């Protein structure tokens, strides 16, 4: 998910693009009608809006009609890494942020609660590990672009990675930054915003670093290749990011290699989307229902172009890099420019994809077997990881018998956990673990799923999911859980 949001509707006829960035002092009215003054560069104009780029790299979109005054100024010098740390501390509170600088990267861990002294060393190690990972991402990304002969520029601003310890804090931040557009915050593991230029992820996603890798590619593209807020098709954004997805911190996958997960999904389901639809329209990527198919199609498209249209791919990316902020393209223009760039129709490209994929699966010796063991569900949520097995017992009238294992994925805190297995018939089983140390595992003892959820429809359970809730052991929630006041799941929520 790129975070490239269609924030403002068309307020007036499109304006001429800004060209060379200028530094000015702008006076404008905010959404509440209050007058604001800011020194910024004009990053671009269009769709009746002006993009004002401030010294910390964040962009404010202002309706042209709301700008009251504009005067030439010396221009804001971009903040350096230490200056960005100060911006982050001011934004989240110095006591709640732990940072690391490894230029051009600034890593910031946003804490959910104060730390004891014993945890500070573990936190420092975690942040350093995240910093090292981002440097590895840059190395692999740069190598790919050099191999494809695509020019890169140096970032104008420090590249920020925000890691939220609390899922609640992440959800609140994501909702505010995205304005509620796109995937719902609870469905997002991380995102890069072209407005803030910051990459934000849940700490639970840093267990394997798969999500930070995906989002870091977006950040690299919009700081070293593309212009932020330019009309870059989302299928390309997600296609190149999925092409770099790998297993953990090794980053051993290349966009020209077959990604077994997306290849398996491409062969298993026809899906509701066509390649033409994701090329011409971005909307599927921003909804909870069709996003899975959209991401799979994006990987298929991007992989095909890298493998079969190498020279045209380079020219196409360079043409995308020339697009300016706040420009607009119609659906027909997007499709026509794509087919003109690659010298073939999308339908012809799609028709040849299955044969070519099968050929590359054999040549690259890629297995499409799922890494998960049959009958086992792995769930990561709220800094907990649960491996759950379920079997249907005929001697129990078809009821589910479940058992599993819980791991505390926090790298530095002990946590209390409440784990539930919830079925489509409105039945559930639960486990309460009052105090589990960082990195430790505990078995979830076998039990029959037979407790009733609120609003349970009844019937025989066919499917199930695992929910994980966590809290600090000395919190009010954990105290209530210890007293037996465990939350009863609500069916359908």
Image (tube, rainbow, N blue to C red):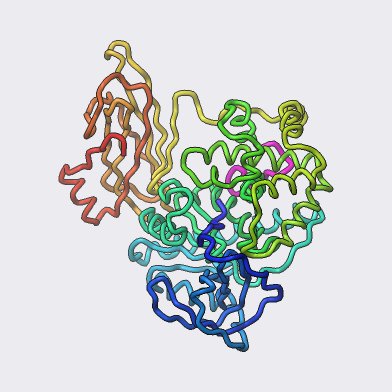
**Residue 22, located in which quarter of the rendered image?**
bottom right
Relative to 133, does residue 269 appear above or below in the rendering?
A: above
Residue 461 location, x and y as percent?
Answer: 32, 22
Residue 127 horizontal side relative to residue 381, left or right: right
Relative to 265, does residue 131 appear above or below in the rendering?
A: below
Residue 125 location, x and y as percent?
Answer: 50, 61
**Outermost residue toward the front?**
13
Q: Is residue 252 magenta?
A: yes
Q: Residue at x 51, y 60 (%)?
A: 9
Residue 446 location, x and y as percent?
Answer: 30, 26
| Viewer-nearest residue: 88 or 69 | 69
* Residue 160 visible in image: no
Q: Residue at x 84, y 48 (%)?
A: 311
**Outermost residue toward the left?**
483
| Viewer-nearest residue: 306 or 62 | 62
Q: Is residue 254 magenta?
A: yes
Relative to 428, does residue 439 appear above or below in the rendering?
A: below
Relative to 355, does residue 222 appear above or below in the rendering?
A: below
Residue 199 location, x and y as percent?
Answer: 54, 60
């Amino acid at each position: 998910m790129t975070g490239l949001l269609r924030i403002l509707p068309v307020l007036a006829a499109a304006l001429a693009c800004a060209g060379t960035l200028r530094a000015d002092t702008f006076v404008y009215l905010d959404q509440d009608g209050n007058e604001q003054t800011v020194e910024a560069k004009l990053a671009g104009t269009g769709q009746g809006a002006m993009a004002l780029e401030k010294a910390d790299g964040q962009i404010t979109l202002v309706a042209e009609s709301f700008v009251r005054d504009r005067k030439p100024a010396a221009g804001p010098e971009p903040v350096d890494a230490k200056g960005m740390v100060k911006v982050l501390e001011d934004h989240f509170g110095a006591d709640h942020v732990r940072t690391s600088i490894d230029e051009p990267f600034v890593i910031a861990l946003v804490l959910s609660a104060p730390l004891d002294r014993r945890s500070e060393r573990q936190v420092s190690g975690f942040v350093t590990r995240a910093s090292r990972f981002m440097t590895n991402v840059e190395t692999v990304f740069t190598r790919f672009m050099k191999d494809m002969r695509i020019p890169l520029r140096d970032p104008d601003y420090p590249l920020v990675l925000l890691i939220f310890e609390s899922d609640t804090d992440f959800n609140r931040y994501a909702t505010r930054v995205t304005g509620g557009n796109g995937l719902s915050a609870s469905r997002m593991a991380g995102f890069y915003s072209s407005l803030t230029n910051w990459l934000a992820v849940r700490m639970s996603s840093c267990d394997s670093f798969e999500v930070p890798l995906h989002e870091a590619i977006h950040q690299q593209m919009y700081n070293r290749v593309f212009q932020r807020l330019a009309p870059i098709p989302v299928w390309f954004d997600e296609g190149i990011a999925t092409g770099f997805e790998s297993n953990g911190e090794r980053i051993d996958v290349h966009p020209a290699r077959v990604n077994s997960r997306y290849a398996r999904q491409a062969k298993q389901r026809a899906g509701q989307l066509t390649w033409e639809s994701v090329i011409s329209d971005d909307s599927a990527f921003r909804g909870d229902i069709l996003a899975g198919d959209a991401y799979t199609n994006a990987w298929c498209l991007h992989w095909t172009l890298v493998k079969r249209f190498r020279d045209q791919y380079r020219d196409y990316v360079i043409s995308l890099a020339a697009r300016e902020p706040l420009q607009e393209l119609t659906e027909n223009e997007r499709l026509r420019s794509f087919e003109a760039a690659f010298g073939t129709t999308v339908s012809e490209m799609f028709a040849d994809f299955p044969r070519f994929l099968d050929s590359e699966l054999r040549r690259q010796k890629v297995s499409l077997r799922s890494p998960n063991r049959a009958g086992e569900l792995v769930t990561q949520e709220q800094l907990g990881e649960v491996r759950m097995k379920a079997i249907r017992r005929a001697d129990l009238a078809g009821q589910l018998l479940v058992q599993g294992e819980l791991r505390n994925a926090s790298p530095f805190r002990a946590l209390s956990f409440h784990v539930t297995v919830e079925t489509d018939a409105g039945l559930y089983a639960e486990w309460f673990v009052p105090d589990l140390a960082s990195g430790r595992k505990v078995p979830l003892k076998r039990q029959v799923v037979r407790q009733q959820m609120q609003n349970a429809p009844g019937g025989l359970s066919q499917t199930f999911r695992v929910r994980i809730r966590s809290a600090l052991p000395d919190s009010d929630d954990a105290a209530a859980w210890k007293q037996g006041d465990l939350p009863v799941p609500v069916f359908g929520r």
